Image (spheres, grey):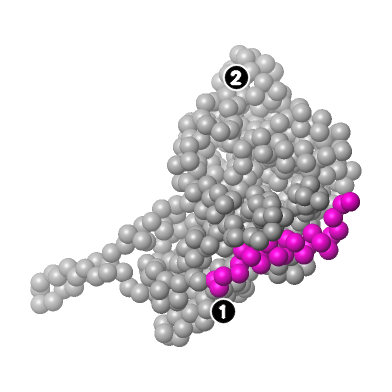
């Protein structure tokens, strides 16, 4: 006979009670390690905390024409700038990896980088098998979704993270995605994947953008093989809508080096913090020119005047991998920062 | 001013210390729990923030403890045995094992729901999750725990 909810609750509660039974003992306030001083203008950087911990205050004092160098230890805790905790999770990052592809040490570095953005960032590390299982658990009984997962195992992380169960629940799913603000990174033998909710998502906040930058830095540092999946969409690097739920996965091969002209163009456009339709057209045209000048056949491009993005295409020229490398290089050089 | 601020930080810390430590103990075990809490508080202060200046210190610190615990679990590969106390009944031991095997976030929400008797909405607000996400975690955890109990019948 199946156990009742009441009995389940009672048993689990009893077990938790045992776990916390001993009186909790954390250090007294005075026993806490003294944190180092962080100056108000210290930039939050991946190594910021480490730098702060290593900080030694050196003061130059001029007395009677003699320069004294006074070296002091880090001051005790001061009030510092008061920063209120954001009321919501800034970003959710799920890193999906193939065992053996990425070392624990690399993940530790990445974890520290993201953790430096504060506890409002929710980071999860799972392997591909776990992502796939989670996605299938959420999609149990939904043959359409399961079929999508069979075709695109690389989007399992997105499905797992969002956790919807039925593509027919599109409106509710859209609402959920809109609030998740997540970034999904999958790192596997076929290269990295970065995904996010669809265009209904609001623009990334500064924090999210910084985290995204950290994610990319991490991917660059991995020096993964530049491979593209054989079942990539026709234009690698383009957005691929999956199902009615509207989730979009962007699969990319990370270029090892960007084209300086493109980087400069993006910087100029972003100087005022806005990207106008005209500027987007200029960048997309430059991206297309980049693809064409590198030999891709039948390059096309368009920008949606209603602000729903852009599209580009070409016909097979040199072979899947070579074509994809060109398209991705041009996209990341000319567009990526404008239209993440 | 500094004295006042530090005193305010100390008050916030003392107010939430036990709850944070209990929470951490469920997630990483009794040995690592004090370190997790200590690390979280130290990191907040080291980043230039003030505990007393946080808008929702309880929620902020609980989220931080959850994330720090997940980091500890990932880095140290904390085994389920680390959080297991002594049980008198076999069924408790098995449920304890199953609880310890739950992913940290599922364990966190079941602890707050079953031990803390909080609603899904309250947990969601505390941990910065959507209520639907909390319910999903609860559902997944309940299914696993129910399976253990049913098998034990």
The residue sitting at 46% across, 83% down in the picture is B7
Closer to the camera in the image, A297 or A53: A53
Q: Which residue is mark 1?
A: B15
Q: Is A288 displayed left or right of B53 in the figure?
A: right
Q: CA distance from mark 2 to mark 1?
A: 59 Å
Residue located at (10% from left, 73% from top): A65
* Residue A92 horizontal/vertical position (percent): 64, 51
Magenta stretch holds residue A21? yes
- Of all chains, the one bearing label 2 is A
Outermost residue toward the left? Answer: A65
Query: Few, some or many C-alpha atoms within 10 Å of disc 2 (few <14, some 14-19, many ≥20)?
Result: some
Q: Can you tell which mark lies on residue A321? A: 2
Q: Visible in this render: residue B112?
A: no
Query: Where's residue A303, x and y in %?
Result: 72, 37
In this view, which residue lies farthest toward the top?
A: A318
Say whether residue A219 is visible.
Answer: yes
The residue shown at (18%, 73%) is A61
Q: Is residue B114 left or right of residue A282?
A: right
Residue A173 on image: x %, y % = 81, 49
Closest to the observer: A26 or A231?
Answer: A26
Q: Nearer the viewer, mark 2 or mark 1?
A: 1
Considering the image in quadrants, where does the C terminus of chain A appear?
top right
Q: In this picture, which residue range is highlighted in magenta?
A: A1-24
Magenta segment: does it hold B57?
no
Residue A121: image quadrant is: bottom right
Q: Is residue A76 above or below residue B96?
A: below
Principal secondary structure, stretch drawn in magenta: helix
Q: Chain of mark 1?
A: B
SS type, badge 2: helix
Q: Nearer the viewer, residue A106 or A276?
A: A106
Do the residues at discs 2 and 1 belong to one chain? Answer: no
Question: Quick check: A10 above or below A244?
Answer: below
């Amino acid at each position: 006979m199946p156990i009742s909810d009441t009995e389940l609750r009672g048993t689990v509660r009893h077990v938790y009670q045992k776990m916390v039974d001993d009186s909790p003992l954390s250090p007294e306030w005075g026993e806490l390690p003294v944190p180092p001083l962080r100056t108000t203008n210290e930039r939050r950087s991946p190594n910021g905390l480490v730098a702060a911990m290593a900080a030694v205050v050196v003061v130059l004092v001029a007395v009677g024409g003699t320069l004294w160098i006074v070296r002091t230890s880090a001051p005790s805790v001061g009030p510092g700038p008061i920063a209120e905790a954001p009321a919501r999770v800034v970003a959710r990052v799920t890193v999906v990896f193939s065992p053996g592809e990425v070392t624990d040490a690399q993940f530790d570095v990445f974890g520290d980088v993201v953790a430096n953005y504060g506890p409002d960032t929710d980071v999860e590390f799972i392997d591909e098998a776990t992502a796939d299982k989670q996605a299938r658990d959420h999609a149990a009984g939904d043959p359409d979704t399961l079929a999508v997962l069979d075709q695109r195992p690389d989007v399992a992380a997105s499905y797992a993270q969002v956790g919807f169960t039925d593509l027919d629940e599109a409106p509710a799913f859209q609402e959920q995605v809109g609030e998740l603000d997540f970034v999904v990174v999958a790192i596997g033998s076929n290269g990295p994947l970065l995904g996010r909710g669809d265009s209904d998502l609001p623009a990334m906040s500064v924090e999210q953008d910084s985290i995204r930058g950290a994610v990319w830095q991490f991917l660059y540092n991995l020096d993964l093989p530049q491979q593209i999946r054989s079942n990539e969409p026709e234009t690698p690097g383009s957005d691929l809508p999956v199902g009615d739920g509207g989730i979009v996965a962007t699969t990319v091969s990370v270029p090892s080096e960007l084209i300086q002209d493109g980087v400069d163009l993006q910087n100029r456009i972003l100087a005022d913090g806005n990207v106008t339709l005209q500027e987007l057209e200029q960048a997309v045209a430059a991206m297309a020119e980049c693809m064409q000048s590198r030999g891709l056949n039948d390059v096309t491009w368009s920008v949606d005047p209603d602000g729903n993005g852009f599209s580009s295409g070409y016909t097979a020229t040199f072979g899947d991998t070579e074509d994809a490398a060109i398209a991705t290089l041009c996209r990341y050089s000319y567009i990526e920062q404008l239209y993440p | 001013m500094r004295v006042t601020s530090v005193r305010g930080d100390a008050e916030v810390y003392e107010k939430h210390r036990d709850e944070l430590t209990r929470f951490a103990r469920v997630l990483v075990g009794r040995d690592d729990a004090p370190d997790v809490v200590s690390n979280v508080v130290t990191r907040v202060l080291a980043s230039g923030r003030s505990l007393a200046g946080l808008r929702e210190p309880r929620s902020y610190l609980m989220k931080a403890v959850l994330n720090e615990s997940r980091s500890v679990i990932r880095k140290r590969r904390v085994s389920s045995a680390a959080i297991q106390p002594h049980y008198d009944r076999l069924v408790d031991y098995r449920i304890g094992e199953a609880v310890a095997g739950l992913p940290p976030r599922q364990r966190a929400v079941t602890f707050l729901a079953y031990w803390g008797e909080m609603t899904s909405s309250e947990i969601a607000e505390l941990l910065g999750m959507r209520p639907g996400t909390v319910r999903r975690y609860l559902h997944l955890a309940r299914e696993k725990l129910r399976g253990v109990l049913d098998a034990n019948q």
